[in-house]
Image: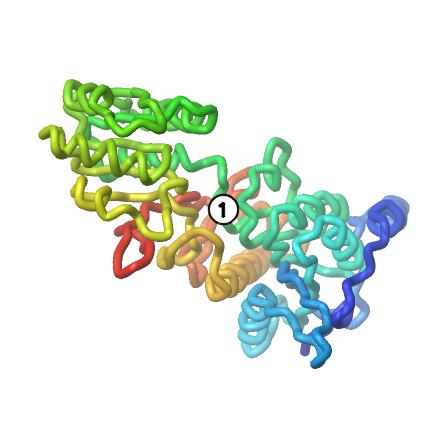
Amino acid sequence: MTTRFNTITGRQPSRLPFGFVALGVLGALVGAAMLAGRPAIAQVSNGDVVILAVDSSRIPEPDGAGHRVALRPVGDGVEEVARDLNQRGGLLGRRVRVTHENDQCEAEEAAVIAARAVANGVSVVIGHPCSSGAIKAAALYAQAGILMIATGPRHPRLTSPVAHRGIFRLAGRDDRQDESIATLIAARFPTARAAIIHDRSVQGRGMAEEIRRSMIAAQVPPALVATYTSGIKDHAAIVSELAKAKADLVVFPGQPFEASMILDQADRAGARIATAIGTDVLAADRPPARLLAAVDAFLVMLPWPGTGEGAGGEKSESTAHELAAAALEVWAAAVVESGSLATDRITGVLEASAHPTRVGAVRFDAKGDAVVPSYLPHVWRDGRWQAWH
């Protein structure tokens, strides 16, 4: 059975001020809980375990031919697992009931939804795929003692600098690309003579320094860190440096066109680079043919897609469905293991050990981040970026 806290219509949802709605509801609940000496979570009269699934697709305005209902990959993934749980007797002998919301990727709407979730006695929240909504709602869920597993948000602020107890993320982090590159080199190219080259821009220089530090920490320090001048055609200077360093692997946090010129000129000068690793900036719709021909392997780091397959970047609808299902699977496993629906006990179990899900074994660290590779190497194959194994 499915319940909706608010009916989806063609009209935009209420945009009540955050202070009047979210803080007002939460203040009353927290105050009552303090008097009662128990967590600020409304009790459910029918005994169901209530799960809230939050999607973030925007609902189109009416077009004159009726109302179009937004897709809900998160909700559908949660419903799939909930049905399976109920067929096997529910959780701790109680029936699982799913409710649905859509925050439309807006922080204010996410706050309204969070307040409504507290009032309705939700046990766990799965979703808030957009970072803005997840970050805003997380503080409210944590204050009320409701556990949340966000599926999709990669912004560091969801779990850093201060982690909220009971707030988890089943996704990688945008600030860990340098670590992912260093881990890849240490695991797959430990004996390579690696060079980092960048264009001296603020972004390029900053990323190059982060990669350098991460490579040193991974015990694969670069043999060369060098720069080139952007906007020119003759890159003999940087090619000479690569040749002198005997570099056979280049990490390139730059643009694909410039990478193709430098690597092509290195190949023509007899200093062919075996492997080039680019940041996600190099994930062009179609990489230059000259670049692909100039190296033996061209790898681009793209966000962990959740299943080890796919082209990275924005999560596809099917991947969002799988991540949402996996989030509920890992939470349900922790409930069974702890024998409780208490957020503190479930949190301890989620951080202590990994649990099997459809996207692999999932464990969370003390901040609430899933222990997954934030970025994975991809190669251009059959007209699209595919995970490299």
Where residue 92 appears, as percent x and y from the top left, is: 62, 66
The answer to whether residue 349 of the structure is visible from this angle is: no
Pick the residue in front: 233 or 349. 233
In this rendering, is residue 246 above or below 150? above
* Picture quadrant where residue 248 is located: top left
Please identify the quadrant where the N terminus is shown: bottom right
Q: Indicate left or right for 240 with 181 as reference.
A: left
Residue, x 17% and y 45% (percent of image)?
293
Q: Colour scheme in the image? A: rainbow
The answer to whether residue 264 of the structure is visible from this angle is: yes
Q: Indicate left or right for 282 with 171 as reference.
A: left
Q: Secondary structure at mark 1?
A: loop
Q: Which residue is mark 1?
A: 370
Where residue 191 appears, as percent x and y from the top left, is: 18, 30
Residue, x 66% and y 40% (percent of image)?
164
Where residue 228 appears, as percent x and y from the top left, is: 31, 23
Where residue 99 appears, as percent x and y from the top left, is: 69, 68
Q: Amino acid at mark 1?
A: Ala
In this rendering, is residue 339 above or below 143? below
Pick the residue in front: 333 or 297. 297
